[in-house]
Image (cartoon, rainbow, N blue to C red):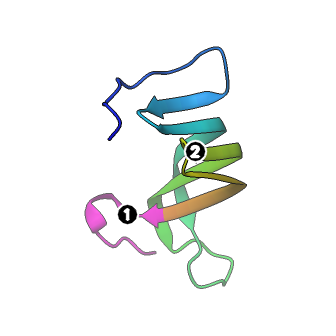
Amino acid sequence: MVAPRPIALDGGSDAILTLGPLQLTGTAGFALTLSTVDADTNGDGAADLLGATLTGLALDVSGLGVEIEDVAHLSAHGAIGLLRVALENNRERFR
């Protein structure tokens, strides 16, 4: 059994997190946006959902590595984006 080591952030390499024999490497970026929008929910060109909150989340990882010392090494890269439209307090407000 490996003795526990403290969590360390290594500013001199691409290590994001080191926890015992586990190390995460690579780079990651994210963006979060909040906007108030009027949305057309039925495709007729007229806004029928007024004052909705549009929440956007984007995540991009490059050269992400997961390494468990003397056991495994995995790598990945990619991006994902999510959007959500919701009304305040889940109330419906249509025109």
- Is 94 left or right of 58, judged from the image as shown? left
Residue at x 55%, y 61% (from the top left corner): 83
Out of 47 and 2, give the one closest to the viewer: 2
- For disc 1, the neighbor class at 10 Å (few under 14, some 14 to 19, many from 20) is some
Q: Which residue is mark 1?
A: 87
Q: Position of residue 92 (x, y in %)?
A: 33, 73
**Residue under the point 41% across and 64% down:** 86
Label 2's element?
Answer: strand
Q: CA distance from mark 1 to mark 2?
A: 42 Å
Q: Which residue is mark 2?
A: 67
Q: Looking at the picture, which amino acid does disc 2 mark? A: Glu
Quadrant housing the N terminus: top left
| Depth order, front residue of 45/82 | 82
User: Residue 12, how many percent across, how many down?
Assistant: 65, 14
Q: Residue furthest front?
A: 1
Q: Quadrant of residue 45?
A: bottom right
Residue 91: quadrant of the picture? bottom left
| Residue 29 tag number | none
Marks 1 and 2: which is nearer the front? Answer: 2
Task: Give left or right: position of 92 versus 75.
Answer: left
Going from N to C along the chain, the mark reached first, 1 or 2, is 2
Is-magenta flag for residue 59?
Answer: no
The residue segment tinted magenta is 85-95
Name the residue: 61% across, 50% down: 58
* Residue 52 horizontal/vertical position (percent): 45, 60
What is the three-letter code of the residue carrying label 1? Answer: Leu
